[in-house]
Image (spheres, rainbow, N blue to C red):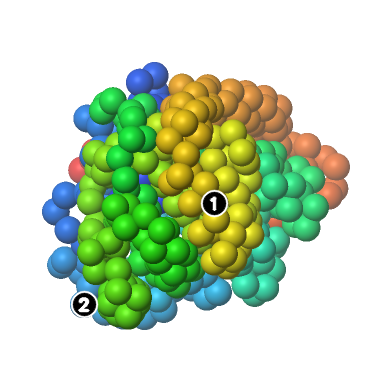
Amino acid sequence: MKISFLLHNGYGIGGTIKTTFNLAQALSERHDVEIISINRHREEPNFTLGPKVRMRALVDLRTEKDDPRHLKPPRVFPAAEYRHDQYSELTDERIADTLATLDADVVIGTRPGLNVHLALQGPPNAVLVGQEHLTLDSHPPALRNELRRVYSRLDALTTVTNADAEAYRRKMRLPDVRVTALPNSVPEPVLPPADTSGRIIVAAGRLVRSKRHELLIRAFAHVAAAHPDWQLRIYGKGDQKDDLRALIDRLGLNNNAFLMGAVTPIEAEWVKGSIACVTSSFEPFGMTIVEAMRCGLPVVSTDCPYGPAEIIRDGEDGRLVPVGDEQALAAALLDLVRDDGLRARMGAAALRNSRRYDPVPVVERAEELFAELLAAKRGRNARLTLPLRKRLVSSGHAVKDAAWAVALTTLRTVRNRQDQQGQEGRR
């Protein structure tokens, strides 16, 4: 299969970029895979991309950010999508042109706004798959209404948790769209796993309000008071850095709690630790949870919607605590700090249980889904393509499905461009 991913910015940093790279690289072992990065702002990507995966950018912000078209708001990308201000008439134009000429078998959008483009403008003969890396309930009402209107034109919608897939089935009513969970994958680390004998608690993620690092620092103060030989290391960057630094100073944790900055890859830092901690108020999946577990660390996490509870087996390979509960978080950390044997057992269980997120089983599920959808779509197209005009005319009925109207329009556009290119070539 020829598979294309639509990605907001493959040169940035974040969970969606990392998991897209992971899936693309795993699929590239048996398929022709490319990543279409809508935006680009630097020379090289932050994450390593295997040589078998091609990546191209549609808008290079280093040279095109002042293009007059880029200074006008987009008409297709939804206004309620929180990346809206990073899209424009220029991105609308480039995305439409790219989709009109794309010859992929499967095209995958990786965020709601790009899924809207895909639903409205995707190649009619390709399987159109929208990925949701956030949750339905996290989207504002205006965006949910827009998605409800256009997602029916997709062939499939994948979420990263079963709970969110069920929410889409129940609330969006997409009877002709295959809605299924496809978790993020994390490759096996190249380093030996942590031995959990150190005295370090590790956290990683953007320093933003939703990650609640201030809660972690306050909970860690209880740990440091009882066990001053333990450290907290927080990896990441973001607009909360100064506030977190001030909190560390105010609590007198300068010798125990450290803001380490962003580090890529992070595996070498996980294996130095003995416990991983996630304190988010909202975590659609929890890439850092799986990354830490794959390095042999037990994870203490808030039980926020939806990811942690589907990843962590409470009491076996980690602990789940109520969102925002400083005392419960401190108690869970202290249980592991005080018991070397418990840390070792949970760390071993984390290493074992996290293998279900290895790229191999995840990619097998993805391949099966894509193959089924592609076979079904080709079967429908074979039945409809040649006799379509005859059947529509003889039946006396208009085309009722707006999706087919969009598909036919796109197909005519592609054919017209091909004809024009052929004529130019003959000249």
User: As drawn, is 314 to the left or to the right of 359?
Assistant: right
Q: Quadrant of residue 262?
A: bottom left
| Above-or-below relation of 26 to 6 | above
Evaluate if marks 1 and 2 touch, with contact meaning CB atoms under 8 Å apart: no
From the top left corner, tell me how far across and down residue 202 is, in percent.
35, 50
Q: Which residue is found at the position 25% from the left and 32% from the top?
A: 50
Q: Quadrant of residue 227?
A: bottom left
Q: Which residue is mark 2?
A: 66
In this view, the residue in front, 293 or 46, is: 293
From the top left corner, tell me how far across and down residue 163 is, in percent.
69, 47
User: As drawn, is 355 to the left or to the right of 323?
Assistant: left
In this view, the residue in front, 76 or 133, is: 133
Q: From this viewpoint, which residue is outermost toward the front?
A: 226
Q: Quadrant of residue 380?
A: top right
Q: Which residue is found at the position 78% from the left and 37% from the top?
A: 391
| Above-or-below relation of 182 to 337 | above
- N-terminal of the pair, mark 1 or mark 2, is 2
**Category of crowding for the residue at label 1, using alpha-carbon neighbours closer than 10 angstroms: few (below 14), some (14–19), many (at least 20):** some
Q: Which residue is mark 1?
A: 332
